[in-house]
Amino acid sequence: METQEISVKKIALNYGVYLALLSIAISVIAYVTDNHIDRPWWISVLSTIVAVGAILYGIKTFKEENNGFLSIGDALKVGLAISLIAGIIGALYNYIFITVIEPDFVTKMLDMTREQIIEQNPDMPQDQMDMAMGISEKMMQPSIMSAIGIITTLFFGFIISLVSGLIMKQNRPEN
């Protein structure tokens, strides 16, 4: 049982770092191409493919190192560990990005949010607009955005891990 724990940690660390670095690379590409405020669909698709690939290969590697056996619990453990590591590294990057690299990011996001609200609800009273913008401003604090990023990464990591575990499941034969 000890070798299985060591294997989970090693695999989670490797694939979690891979996922984080690839996600950061996608964010840098979005920033350089000036697509970091209003992200186009292809960035979301690419991010999803990278996340699915990293978690899937991490679980597959675990299964191979476990003599071809994989339980759903093991798949969830590996996938969530990969997601947690990637989420923490990604949250640190986003915090640095928002506070150091692009300190106007939150202001730009709030301006875009205001424009979208006005576009979708042109007759919204000013007091409702102020309330909506106040909530948006609170949610866009760097610490809140980092926490939401980790939670979101864990949520999608859970879904990906569960589906992967159901597909790749191979129980040990009972003696």
Image: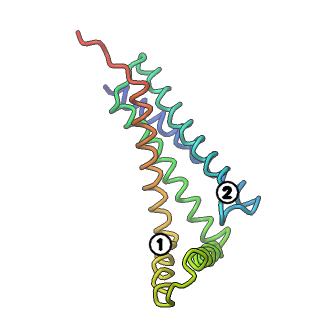
Left or right of 40: which side holds 123? Answer: left
Identified by mark 2, the residue type is: Pro
Element class at badge 2: loop
Direction top: furthest residue = 175
- Identify which residue is drawn at 59% across, 41% down: 49
Direction bottom: furthest residue = 126
- Identify which residue is drawn at 76% across, 59% down: 32
- Identify which residue is drawn at 49% across, 26% down: 60
Element class at badge 1: helix
Quadrant location of the N terminus? top left
Q: Nearer the viewer, residue 128 or 38?
A: 128
Closer to the chain start, of discs 2 and 1, is 2
Quadrant location of the C terminus? top left
Direction front: furthest residue = 123
Residue 122: x %, y % from top left: 57, 82
Q: Is residue 11 above or below residue 86?
A: above
- Identify which residue is drawn at 60% across, 47% down: 47
- When asked about the image quadrant of residue 36, the answer is bottom right
Residue marked by disc 1:
139
Residue marked by disc 2:
40
Q: Which mark is residue 66?
A: none
Identified by mark 1, the residue type is: Met
Residue 150: x %, y % from top left: 46, 56
